[in-house]
Image (cartoon, coloured by chain):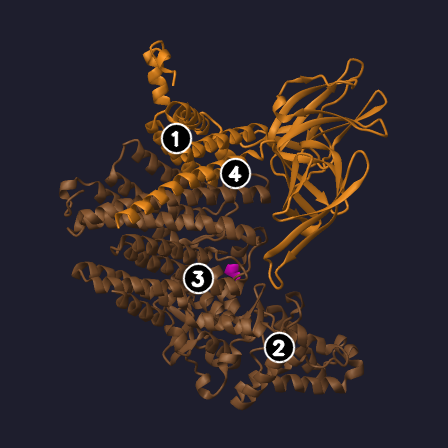
């Protein structure tokens, strides 16, 4: 059996690294440009220095909800889309980019917008810009959660259009074809008027075409500075970075030369425009050398981040977890111990990849594993999977593996949807900025959530397996009972300790140990519910089946605490507001109540014989 | 145990009562109640806000619901459930727990919970929260509680010292005659408006109208010519008062937290200041805000760092500098100052100030409970694993 364990492990690891073994496809790479190197260039975006690749992904996710753009002509990766938008705005403007889903919800159909179409290009939306602008402006003054659905749509569309505009005009204005030639032409004109430059600009001579040109260029630089999506001109510290626009504005000072990094960027994009891969690659090397002198270790870290995003480790492991779950079911059906061993090995391998991905996130962010809602999903899954592995090691009947598989799959799907807000490696707000408390309170409470969810999944196996199939042997029932009780007890301890640590953090931070804040209440509800299960069992009010039925409800309490409290929009813990998620949580709770009802049906209706 | 010789004399009813109070079933029921209460209270916060939700569901014995004019208690509220759990826990503790090594963990856990509940109760009674809203360069020797207003009469005649006589908002009512000590007048409260709003008379621009929110539609005319309104307050406590004195006929005055300037009284050649303001808690020391720093992540509006650089001046002389920032409060003289917020783009720092003599109790309780839990479940885990080993 050991052999099959190791075979499963190796297969799972290979599948986990599937995307990292295949180099990312790029239209520009096939033309000879070193896009993989270009993608690692640094940009300061939302307060963090990250690779261009991440900004491309985050922006495309914000606009399109995906990390790549599929069109009739082919699929653009995020970085491809970024380059096309900047270098060939004519083409980019005609790509189907903005997903309105239902144009009538934007108040635009009566203006002529095709109502059956869902995705629109920038070009198709141009006639409606004024309308969108005037509708969005008053909506922006209203608090986000108080906006009507129409207002939310219009504000979101406005934001997406703005992001796209910003992206196109960060390195040079979209109206310019060859940026390097454009700036150098400006420098030539400037040298002619060197001494009286300021005088000429403050009193522009309407008849002089050169002066007119310089005024326009000034305005262009200003536009680039105001609307930059990020800052690419590096400094020693994050505070010293500036945008292309700001850097080019300094050219209006007497005798200031072009910043070398800015000059290199201009050349890079000119090379793309004139379709000169050799020039592109050479300039890229020069730029790299310059960047390494300013910040020696930065590029390596950024290259690592690009690799990490390309590897999509959470996406691959999510798929493998699903396969493992199916594998365990098949192993049970066919009573194949070999297949069972394979699945355990696969689980161990996938868990290893999952762990590695978490560690990489920690290294990239310089933080403990949980820093935002996205990372809670990834970490809670990891905890439950680890506990499932331990259960499998102890009981060796596939139950642990099954739980790990299904929880891994579901939590990573949740994580995937939570990643649609943009950059998952984002910076932390001031009040959360404490590595000590992030490592203690946040980690422990998430361990508690993971254990609570595991106890609920075990209960599902007992109820659904026992009611719908005859496969739930007395042995299995007995081990399920033990597993559930142990997990409930562990979850109670972890949730209690985690809640207490939260109270201590609150006392250190805000002056009170407990404030009846929704998130605090959510955690307390889990503790109370788990305590009810244990005490009701001790009091003889419920027996084994009762523990299982009540344990299913633990999922309802946990989902309220994990997500429901964020949706209330009040208190110190409101990090985000999710509309669609509310619908799915309600659906989920209804399924749990249904399972509880099934579990409560008379025992003689169950297909499996009771203990 | 020597209880045996007393058990005959204990009335059976009392025994039954103690049994009931110590029962696990009661625990489950009470825990169930607390679950529902906390859940409902969390949802209620959205519309009512934390303060009111807490008041309605936790700080009462019952949850009252109004059925067409009659208020009925429909569900046990925080106080009842809290006391219930505490009594249940204590009686169970002494009635059912035995001194044995295997039960030590459980015993400690529940003992720690008792301490936690008691600590919570003490905090509820004794804790005082206020705010220090201070400008850069300003020195203040008090903090303010905006939940509780006070009416003050200040004797400003001594150049070295102000004497402040204050009446807390909940001590005042309409029609009351106040007899403040050390001043040559009494103060009649003609009308107290706990939540008032002001408006200029549309027909006579110089006359001000005031009414009580949210119920009243009628507005009272005030015979004052001008009032410098502080428009950031939309509902403020105000009072129409009449300083009375045997020898002098004086006129009605209106004081309000919504007015920028207080009322000045000149009586018998002396000057007194009348106003309504947030309750002040004076401290023996004073705090000067030297500098407030507010940093955002470059290129964003996301807050990265807030801090207040303060100097504390002690009454016996001597000063000390402190830096207060997120997760690093200043603990001084039983009070703790936390960096909470800021105003006017960084000109004003807002510190939350908490005075809670019971602050250490939750820490102690939680250590006890944690040790208890680890002991109990740790022993169970060890037992389980060794049984498995034994079976092999």
Residue named by callout 3 = A419
Q: Is residue B267 left or right of residue A542?
A: right
Number of the front mark, 1 or 3:
1
Residue named by callout 1 = B100
Q: CA distance from mark 2 to mark 4?
A: 49 Å
- Mark 4 surroundings within 10 Å by alpha-carbon count, few (fewer than 14), some (14 through 19), many (20 or more): some
Please determine if labels 2 and 4 lie on a single subunit. Answer: yes
Marking on residue A292: 2
Number of the front mark, 2 or 3:
2
Chain shown brown: that is: A
Number of the front mark, 2 or 4:
2
Instruction: Let me know if residue A334 appears in the view.
Output: yes
When asked about the image quadrant of residue A375, the answer is bottom left
Number of the front mark, 1 or 2:
1
Q: Is residue A57 left or right of residue A395?
A: right
Q: Earlier in the sequence, mark 3 or mark 4?
A: 3
Q: Which residues fall within the magenta stretch?
A: A132-136
Q: CA distance from mark 3 to mark 4?
A: 31 Å
Q: Are marks 1 and 2 in contact (CB under 8 Å)?
A: no
- Mark 3 surroundings within 10 Å by alpha-carbon count, few (fewer than 14), some (14 through 19), many (20 or more): many
Q: Nearer the viewer, residue B325 or B270?
A: B325
Q: Is residue A282 left or right of residue A184?
A: left
Q: Is residue A38 above or below residue A455?
A: below
Q: Is residue A131 above or below residue B349?
A: below
């Amino acid at each position: 059996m050991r052999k099959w364990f190791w075979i499963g492990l190796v297969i799972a690891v290979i599948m986990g690294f599937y995307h990292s073994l295949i180099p990312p496809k790029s239209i520009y790479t096939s033309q000879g440009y070193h896009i993989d190197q270009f993608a690692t260039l640094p940009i300061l975006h939302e307060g963090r220095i990250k690779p261009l690749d991440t900004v491309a992904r985050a922006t495309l996710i914000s606009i399109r909800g995906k990390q790549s753009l599929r069109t009739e002509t082919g699929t653009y990766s995020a970085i491809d889309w970024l380059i096309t938008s900047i270098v060939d705005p004519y083409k980019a403007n005609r790509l189907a980019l903005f997903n309105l889903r239902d144009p009538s919800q934007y108040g635009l159909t009566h203006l002529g917008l095709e109502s059956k179409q869902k995705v629109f290009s920038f070009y198709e939306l141009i006639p409606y810009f004024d309308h969108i602008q005037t509708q969005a402006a008053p909506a922006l003054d209203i608090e986000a959660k108080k906006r009507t659905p129409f207002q939310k749509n219009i504000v979101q569309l406005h934001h997406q259009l703005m992001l796209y505009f910003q992206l196109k005009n960060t390195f040079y204005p979209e109206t310019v074809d060859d940026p390097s030639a454009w700036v150098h032409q400006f420098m030539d004109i400037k040298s002619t008027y060197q001494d009286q430059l300021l005088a000429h600009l403050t009193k522009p001579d309407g008849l002089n075409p050169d002066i007119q040109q310089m005024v326009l260029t000034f305005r262009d630089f200003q536009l680039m500075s105001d609307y930059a999506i990020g800052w690419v001109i590096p400094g020693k510290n994050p505070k010293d970075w500036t945008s292309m626009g700001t850097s080019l504005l300094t050219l209006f000072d007497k005798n200031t030369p072009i910043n070398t990094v800015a000059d290199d960027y201009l050349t890079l994009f000119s090379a793309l425009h004139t379709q000169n891969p050799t020039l592109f690659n050479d300039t890229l090397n020069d730029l790299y050398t310059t960047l390494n002198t300013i910040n020696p270790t930065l590029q390596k870290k950024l290259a690592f981040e690009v690799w990490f995003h390309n590897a999509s480790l959470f996406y691959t492991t999510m798929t493998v977890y699903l396969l493992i779950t199916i594998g365990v079911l098949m192993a049970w059906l066919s009573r194949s111990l070999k297949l069972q061993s394979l699945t355990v090995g696969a689980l161990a391998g996938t868990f290893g990849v999952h762990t590695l991905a978490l560690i990489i996130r920690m290294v990239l962010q310089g933080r403990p594993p949980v820093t935002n809602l996205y990372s809670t999903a990834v970490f809670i899954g990891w905890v439950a999977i680890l506990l499932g592995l331990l259960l499998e090691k102890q009981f060796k009947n596939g139950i642990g593996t099954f739980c790990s598989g299904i929880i891994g799959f579901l939590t990573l799907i949740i994580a995937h949807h939570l990643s649609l807000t943009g950059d998952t490696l984002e910076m932390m707000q001031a009040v959360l900025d404490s590595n000590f408390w992030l490592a203690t309170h946040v980690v422990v409470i998430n361990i508690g959530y993971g254990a609570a969810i595991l106890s609920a999944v075990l209960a599902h196996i007992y109820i659904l397996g026992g009611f719908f199939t005859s496969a739930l042997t007395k042995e299995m029932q007995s081990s399920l009972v033990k597993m559930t009780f142990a997990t409930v007890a562990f979850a109670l301890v972890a949730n209690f300790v985690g809640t207490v640590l939260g109270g201590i953090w609150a006392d250190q931070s805000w002056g009170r140990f407990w404030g009846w804040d929704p998130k605090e209440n959510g955690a307390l509800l889990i503790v109370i519910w788990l305590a009810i299960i244990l005490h009701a069992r001790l009091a003889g009010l419920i027996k084994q089946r009762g523990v299982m039925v009540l344990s299913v409800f633990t999922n309802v309490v946990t989902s309220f605490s994990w997500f429901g409290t964020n949706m209330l929009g009040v208190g110190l813990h409101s990090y985000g507001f999710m509309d669609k998620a509310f619908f799915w949580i309600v659906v989920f709770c209804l399924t749990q109540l249904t399972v509880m009802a099934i579990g409560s049906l008379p025992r003689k209706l169950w297909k499996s014989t009771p203990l | 145990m020597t209880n045996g010789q007393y058990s005959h004399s204990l009335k059976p009813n009392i025994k039954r009562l103690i049994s009931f109070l110590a029962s696990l079933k009661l625990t489950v029921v009470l825990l169930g109640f607390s679950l529902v209460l906390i859940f409902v209270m969390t949802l209620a916060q959205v519309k009512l806000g934390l303060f009111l939700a807490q008041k309605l569901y936790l700080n009462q014995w019952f949850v009252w619901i109004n059925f067409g004019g009659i208020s009925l208690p429909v569900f046990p509220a925080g106080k009842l459930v809290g006391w219930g759990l505490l009594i249940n826990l204590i009686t169970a503790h002494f009635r059912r727990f035995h001194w044995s090594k295997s039960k030590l963990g459980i015993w400690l856990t529940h003992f720690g919970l008792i301490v936690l509940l008691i600590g919570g109760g003490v905090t509820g009674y004794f804790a005082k929260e206020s705010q220090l809203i201070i400008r850069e360069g300003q020195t203040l020797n008090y903090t303010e509680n905006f939940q509780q207003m006070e009416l003050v009469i200040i004797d400003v005649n001594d150049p070295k010292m102000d004497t402040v006589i204050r009446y807390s908002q909940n001590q005042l009512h309409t029609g009351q005659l106040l007899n403040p000590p050390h001043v040559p007048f009494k103060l009649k409260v003609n009308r107290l408006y706990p939540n008032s709003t002001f408006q200029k008379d549309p027909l006579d621009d110089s006359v001000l109208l005031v009414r009580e929110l949210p119920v009243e539609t009628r507005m009272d005319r005030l015979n004052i010519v001008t009032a410098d309104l502080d428009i950031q307050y939309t509902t403020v406590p105000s009072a129409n008062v009449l300083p009375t004195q045997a020898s002098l006929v004086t006129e009605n005055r209106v004081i309000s937290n919504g007015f920028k300037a207080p009322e000045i009284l000149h009586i018998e050649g002396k000057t007194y200041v009348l106003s309504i303001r947030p309750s002040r808690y004076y401290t023996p020391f004073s705090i000067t805000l030297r500098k407030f720093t507010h940093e955002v992540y470059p290129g964003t509006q996301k807050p990265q760092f807030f801090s207040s650089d303060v100097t504390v001046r002690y009454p016996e002389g001597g000063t000390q500098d402190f830096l207060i920032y997120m997760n690093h409060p200043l603990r001084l003289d039983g009070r703790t100052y936390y960096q909470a917020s800021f105003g006017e783009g960084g000109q004003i720092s807002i510190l939350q100030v908490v005075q809670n003599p019971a602050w250490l109790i939750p820490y102690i309780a939680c250590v006890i409970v944690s040790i208890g839990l680890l002991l109990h479940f740790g022993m169970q885990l060890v037992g389980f694993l060794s049984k498995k080993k034994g079976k092999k």
